Image (tube, rainbow, N blue to C red):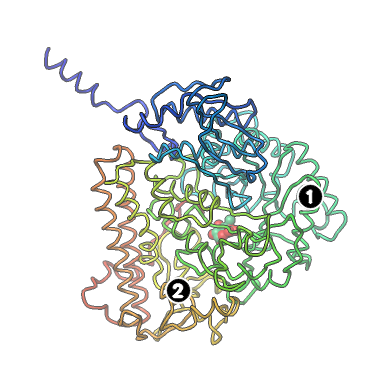
């Protein structure tokens, strides 16, 4: 009997808690801080006081939730000021839009902490910042902050049938079928997460849009979502299909200069604002990858964007017009297309249009030089688009922290107005005096319990928000905050994990596309390697188009002996990549086609360097596995196991990338592997034979 009682006690003591750590709470876990910290914070968090408005009510609720959890108390939401209260004060005109100031003050003789702001939204951001101070064990001192970028927007590539283009974390969180009647409570947590990182806009549907999302029933559904988002300061936007007037109303044309088309969009805008009074505006992918657009009527992008902008303007709406144009009718180097189409219409866009430009000229590759349009159109409102989902960076399984990739783009110097003309200064408007600024991130969120599939992919979402708020921020600092809030603030955990995250993007570039190679992924789903693919109808659909490997050498010549894409950059920017002997070799084969025996900076031949990089990448993932294995004591078993499993997949796939790529390039170069490099496990035919008809996200 005694044994039975002991067994029962043991089972109770070690049983999993009712709610295990499953990643659902993201960086907003609000687990109790250590007693010594709680003792410091509690006297400054005795009550919460603020007006009764929709956003301030969510602010107070979040503060209560956070403080109750972090400090293990029942924090009253009160009316009267008492010592130690947190007081929300809005209407301070000296504080920038969406900004806040946290400071100790005396009100009626009581020592309080005031979170002041101009707008309710500013107070909400201030509250999240206050909580972050506690989550990361920082003191609550005077803190003043404001976003440097006005529109901080998430783009969902979510389809109306619930699938998500390039989504690797389940299906869409928007249940279009059952909306507006059934509004998933999860959407509130989604809005909390977005607001916590400063996101103030969400595009609900895929840029490869269906016209249906503009019909009345779907607008009612969008409004049901907007109702959830509004108390968190988030506006909804829709991707608009260019040919909607034809598809929905039978117009003969979608020509932007046709009065009937203009009238259709004007009426549509009126209808939208009747249903969604604070609608943000449209995101448009036009004349790209088969999407319709003004080019179908020989009109340019400015003519197209301006027509929509005119329809939205009376309501305060805006247009985000994408510069990702990829036309199958343009035989030019694909990297040149956007610049060639947009530069000529510089100065012609309406003031409520933003040109949304991907970080690089091709398509979210592991590494690309910054997009040549940055700095090339100083009269145009330019916004940056990055991919948070990892279409080309290991999709749902690889641990690849993209903070350094975003930071690399933001810090890139375009030299457009002389040294220091960084992409960050262009998109925050400071370089060319724009006040209408933006940054967009393509969402990695789905209905997986932990939102992003891979627990570490939450960090990309988090980093996007923090960098859209402050494009000068450090991706390392952001990773450190994220790790502390999401896992543990124990320095024995934080340091190795942040180091691992910071190195992870370089690691992926090494095993997938070293030395500036690009687009070597398999066709369609882009899962895994496919460098050998060379038989697709259009040249630039083929990975072989990008690597141009043959018996003599490898690389895409984008200098004047080749496509001369380098000339789309300012001379000062282009200069850094002009000489293959002196340049940053991480961009080498992006700009240059070189012989296999070219001597790189390490003293090795290009061939040896390429192979060494692939090999190093695969080994680096094995090292990541070891780092993580040593973290077991600091992590809950659920997330430890999930991350370990994903790293196992990543290690296997990194080796696959290494072996398949080496195999293929060796079939071209005919050269022996450098000393000490193990040969690929299989022959090239084996790698070519692998087929993944059910790879996700396609
Ligand atoms: C939404 C790439 C992706 C497409 C995506 C496109 C875009 O080509 O593979 O899935 O389409 O970019 O950004 O529009």
Rendered image: mark on residue 313: 1
562 w.r.t. 689: above or below:
below
Rendered image: mark on residue 363: none
Figure quarter occupied by ligand 1: bottom right
67 w.r.t. 474: above or below:
above
Look at mark 2 in the image and give the residue it sits on. Answer: 587
Percent position of residue 543, x then y: 47, 71
Q: Residue furthest left?
A: 2
Asked whether the viewer can see residue 361, the reply is no
Q: Earlier in the sequence, mark 1 or mark 2?
A: 1
Give the residue displayed 56% in from the left and 27% down from the top.
107
Quarter holding the N terminus is top left
Q: Nearer the viewer, residue 497 or 299?
A: 497
Q: Nearer the viewer, residue 560 or 642?
A: 560
Percent position of residue 250, x then y: 81, 50
- Label 1 crowding class (10 Å Cα cut-off): few <14, some 14-19, many 20+? some
């Amino acid at each position: 009997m005694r044994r039975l009682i002991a067994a029962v006690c043991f089972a109770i003591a070690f049983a999993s808690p009712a709610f295990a750590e499953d990643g659902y709470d993201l960086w907003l876990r609000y687990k109790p801080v250590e007693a010594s910290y709680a003792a410091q914070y509690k006297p400054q968090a005795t009550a919460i006081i603020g007006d009764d408005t929709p956003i301030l009510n969510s602010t107070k609720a979040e503060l209560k939730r956070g403080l109750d959890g972090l400090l293990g108390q029942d924090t009253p939401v009160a009316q009267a000021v008492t010592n130690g209260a947190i007081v929300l004060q809005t209407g301070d005109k000296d504080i920038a839009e969406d900004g806040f100031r946290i400071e100790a003050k005396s009100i009626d003789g009581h020592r309080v902490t005031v979170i002041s702001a101009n707008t309710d939204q500013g107070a909400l951001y201030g509250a999240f910042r206050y909580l972050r101070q506690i989550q990361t064990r920082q003191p609550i001192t005077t803190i003043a902050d404001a976003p440097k970028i006005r529109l901080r927007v998430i783009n969902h590539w979510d389809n109306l049938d619930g699938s998500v283009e390039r989504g690797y974390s389940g299906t869409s969180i928007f249940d279009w079928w059952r909306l507006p009647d059934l509004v998933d409570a999860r959407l509130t947590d989604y809005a909390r997460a977005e607001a916590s990182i400063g996101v103030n806009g969400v595009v609900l549907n895929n840029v490869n849009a269906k016209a249906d999302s503009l019909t009345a029933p779907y607008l009612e559904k969008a409004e049901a979502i907007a109702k959830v988002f509004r108390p968190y300061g988030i506006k909804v936007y829709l991707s608009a299909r260019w040919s909607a007037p034809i598809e929905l109303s039978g117009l003969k044309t979608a020509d932007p200069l046709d009065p009937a088309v203009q009238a259709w969009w004007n009426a549509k805008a009126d209808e939208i604002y009747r249903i969604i009074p604070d609608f943000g505006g449209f995101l448009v992918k036009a004349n790209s990858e088969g999407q319709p657009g003004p080019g179908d009527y020989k009109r340019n992008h400015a003519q197209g964007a301006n027509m929509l902008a005119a329809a939205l303007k009376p309501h305060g709406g805006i247009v985000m017009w994408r510069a990702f144009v990829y036309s199958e009718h343009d035989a030019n180097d694909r990297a040149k297309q956007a610049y060639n189409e947009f530069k000529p219409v510089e100065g012609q866009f309406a003031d409520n249009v933003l040109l949304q430009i991907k970080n690089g000229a091709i398509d979210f590759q592991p590494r690309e030089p910054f997009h040549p349009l940055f700095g090339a159109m100083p009269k145009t409102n330019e916004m940056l688009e990055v991919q948070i989902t990892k279409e080309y960076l290991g999709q749902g399984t690889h641990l690849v922290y993209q903070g350094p990739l975003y930071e690399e783009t933001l810090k890139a110097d375009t030299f457009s107005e002389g040294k220091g003309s960084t992409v960050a200064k262009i998109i925050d408007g400071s370089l060319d005096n724009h006040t209408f600024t933006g940054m967009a991130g393509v969402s990695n969120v789905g209905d997986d319990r932990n939102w992003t599939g891979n627990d570490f992919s939450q960090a990309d979402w988090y980093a996007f928000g923090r960098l859209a708020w402050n494009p000068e921020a450090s991706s390392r600092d952001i990773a450190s905050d994220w790790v502390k809030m999401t896992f543990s603030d124990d320095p024995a955990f934080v340091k190795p994990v942040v180091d691992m995250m910071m190195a992870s993007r370089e690691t992926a570039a090494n095993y997938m596309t070293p030395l500036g190679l690009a687009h070597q992924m398999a066709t369609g789903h882009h899962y895994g390697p496919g460098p050998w693919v060379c038989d697709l109808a259009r040249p630039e659909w083929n990975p072989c188009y990008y690597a141009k490997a043959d018996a003599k050498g490898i690389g895409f010549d984008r200098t004047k002996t080749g496509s001369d894409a380098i000339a789309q950059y300012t001379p000062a920017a282009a200069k850094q990549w002009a000489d293959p002997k002196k340049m940053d070799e991480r961009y080498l084969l992006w700009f240059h086609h070189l012989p296999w025996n070219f001597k790189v900076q390490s003293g090795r031949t290009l061939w040896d360097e390429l192979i060494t990089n692939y090999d190093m990448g695969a080994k680096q993932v094995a090292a990541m596995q070891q780092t993580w294995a040593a973290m077991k004591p600091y992590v809950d078993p659920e997330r430890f196991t999930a991350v370990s499993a994903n790293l196992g997949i990543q290690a296997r796939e990194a080796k696959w990338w290494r072996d398949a790529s080496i195999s293929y390039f060796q079939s071209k170069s005919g050269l022996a592997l450098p000393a000490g490099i193990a040969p690929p496990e299989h022959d090239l035919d084996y790698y070519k034979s692998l087929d993944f008809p059910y790879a996700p996200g396609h």
